[in-house]
Image (spheres, coloured by chain):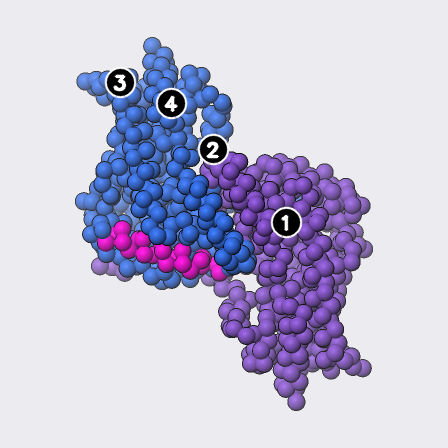
Chain colours: A blue, B purple
Amino acid sequence: MTQTHWTLAARAAKMNPSVIREILKVTERPGIISFAGGLPSPQTFPVAEFEAACAKVLKDDPAGALQYAASEGYGPLRELVAENLGKQSAAAGVPWKVDPAQVLITTGSQQGLDLVAKILIDADSKVLVESPTYLGAVMAFMPMEPNVVSVASDDEGLDIADLRDKAKDARFLYVLPNFQNPTGRSMSEARRAALSAEAARSGLPLMEDNPYGDLWFDQAPPAPLTARNPEGGIYLGSFSKVLAPGLRMGFVVAPKAVHPKLLQAKQAADLHSPGFNQRMIFEVMQNGFLDRHVPTIRSLYKAQRDAMLQALAHHFPSTANPDDTLTWNTPAGGMFLWARLPKGMNAVDLLPRAVDKGVAFVPGAPFYAGNADARAMRLSFVTPSVEEIRRGVAALAEAIHAQRS
Amino acid sequence: MTQTHWTLAARAAKMNPSVIREILKVTERPGIISFAGGLPSPQTFPVAEFEAACAKVLKDDPAGALQYAASEGYGPLRELVAENLGKQSAAAGVPWKVDPAQVLITTGSQQGLDLVAKILIDADSKVLVESPTYLGAVMAFMPMEPNVVSVASDDEGLDIADLRDKAKDARFLYVLPNFQNPTGRSMSEARRAALSAEAARSGLPLMEDNPYGDLWFDQAPPAPLTARNPEGGIYLGSFSKVLAPGLRMGFVVAPKAVHPKLLQAKQAADLHSPGFNQRMIFEVMQNGFLDRHVPTIRSLYKAQRDAMLQALAHHFPSTANPDDTLTWNTPAGGMFLWARLPKGMNAVDLLPRAVDKGVAFVPGAPFYAGNADARAMRLSFVTPSVEEIRRGVAALAEAIHAQRS
């Protein structure tokens, strides 16, 4: 008997286990306070509403919910998505008339990344990303073997001059303008306007990912980039952060230039997303449930962010030279805060020592497609309680001080 | 403002809308009796059990069911899949010890096809398929740009001599041994043994797809090919035909040579399949529910197959020369029957005339990767009732006789 000749595709060499997920495995020991995961607080899951929705869906139209269905998604949910996006954009001052026919329901917004990669990336295609950027997006792109190029970014978002230098022949720019994963930063209105103008000038397609946009603390973010030029962008959205991730429901809004191919890619990938889940989401969402529910998530996460900011300020008083201490930003929404260790320290080295003290985080380095900042770290403030946040930051301070002394 | 430069990947040109789904759109007019779809009978969906499972899952562990989860799938479901496969194979005479660690839960078994394609197919890689074969598999493979090569097949399955001629350097053979879509045929034990021996001789990897294996009418099919050499094959299974397609739940059992890459591809594709759905399936399946439920599906589908066979025999009496009339096979399970029009007729041309008479089917041609049989047609006997099957076959006979005269 000959040994079976398994030959992996060349692209398989570009695929790797998520560094973050590997880190999470190490840090998910009982008793560890975790700032590492990107997990929404389970307190925010509308369990009673899901129970009612399940019962209703299975009572009203079990055959419809349980049968094979259209690859595009459940019609009423597509309409609701289009309507909500239109309302939000109008409220932000940029009307966007979304045609439900342009909405494709996906198995989590992660699938949107996979489908877009399939239809837009050839081997060695240039794909632009922020610096740092969402690791899951890069992982979705990698099987299609792109040349991922980082665009310099600051606290307000992308550096437009650097974008202009790099935009030529790029297949698209992947951008997460609201409360970005991993940094928690948001793109300012001025920067969005400049980015839109630059994309319009150069013809650069945008891929706008917006899983966190609803989780603002004091004021809604500026209008989506895609609203400013719907034919020039693909917009990805998610129900994971406002309802629950475990149903794996997201969507892509795509212009006519790419929607049909995206739909064909979807059909080949999994025929359609679960019709049962689409109906559950629709049942829960209709009649304005999110308008009542999302504010409760915002105030919970804001209180937890505040607790983290206070604890950080307590343990790391500001110094004349910011290189001498831990520094951090103040996210205006979302789930993450971005911190930077004192000069000479390295977040990867710190992690096991922090875990020994009882707290976990994710080092920032894996989020950079190019030059990584070894001092950066991502701290999630949404999963632990306020009390755990205080203890966790104290433990982090202990680990940092111990390593410096 | 420059027009946005949308540049599609080269692979996008290989992607096309499913011919079948396009046909289904035309034929889904009200009042049409459809033998066209591959839809399980909604009568078989265990709605009450799903209701109970939803309630239990959301009561017992809502945070677990609704949170992000492991890419591998829900542990207890993976164990149940492994256990069931082991039992079935042992009962068929070939023990197969499936390690739950080799089981990957997928978003429908269609996703398994997509993931395997990603990790095993390079542009121009040779991939072998039966003739005819499942169109959805070819559609899942196409974005990776394989050279799809048909292996000659007869009523017992693959032609082993032709396989031997074509096996060299093939990345894998895709095969659907039980009640195949589209033909309804099954591979005989002798043919399976010969195929296994040939794969072992040449080192050819097998990709065994088994969505219909549980739907046997008189006796269980022979043991899976993968059970005969677990390190030499990837096995795909589905819950769509024994529970319901609308939850989009399937699985892949893969050997150590490919499982890790498959898992990475899964993570990049949609992070994980919905944890809620996985728990629902697990709750319904445990305590041997399928042992009670699946026999009811078998007897329903068998009665409907019998009704179709009788109606066909009534309207198309046998003739001295089989080219003079409609001929068909007698599937021993599954959902489909394969028929062949009289010489000189063409199933694609017949379809609109049949729809005018009130009945729809799928022409066989799209299922061939190579030389298509223009006279072939696929008739599904599971969605319409016995009474509709009788009327539908009568209408089909009218359309055929009208076109011949």
In the rendered image, which residue does mark 2 sit on?
A21
Q: In the rendered structure, which disc, 2 or 3, sits on the residue that comes first in sequence?
A: 2
The 10 Å Cα crowd at callout 2, few under 14, some 14 to 19, many 20 or more, is some
Q: Amino acid at mark 4?
A: Glu
Q: Amino acid at mark 1?
A: Gly
Q: CA distance from mark 2 to mark 3?
A: 31 Å
The 10 Å Cα crowd at callout 1, few under 14, some 14 to 19, many 20 or more, is many
Q: Amino acid at mark 2?
A: Arg
Q: Nearer the viewer, residue A17 or A255?
A: A255
* Residue A361 is inside the magenta segment: no
In front: mark 2 or mark 4? Answer: 4
The residue sitting at 65% across, 76% down in the picture is B391
Q: CA distance from mark 3 to mark 4?
A: 15 Å
Local SS, label 2? helix
The residue sitting at 72% across, 75% down in the picture is B312
In the rendered image, which residue does mark 3 sit on?
A314
Q: In the rendered structure, which disc, 2 or 4, sits on the residue that comes first in sequence?
A: 2
Local SS, label 1? strand
Left or right: where A267 falls relative to A146: right
Whether label 2 touches label 4, CB < 8 Å: no
Local SS, label 4? helix
Q: Which residues are magenta?
A: A70-90
In front: mark 2 or mark 3? Answer: 3
Q: Is residue A285 above or below residue A367?
A: below
Give percent across and percent down for residue B193: 79, 51
Main secondary structure of the magenta stretch: helix
In the rendered image, which residue does mark 4 sit on?
A388
Whether label 1 touches label 4, CB < 8 Å: no
In front: mark 3 or mark 4? Answer: 4
The answer to whether marks 2 and 1 sit on the same chain is no
Q: CA distance from mark 2 to mark 1?
A: 27 Å
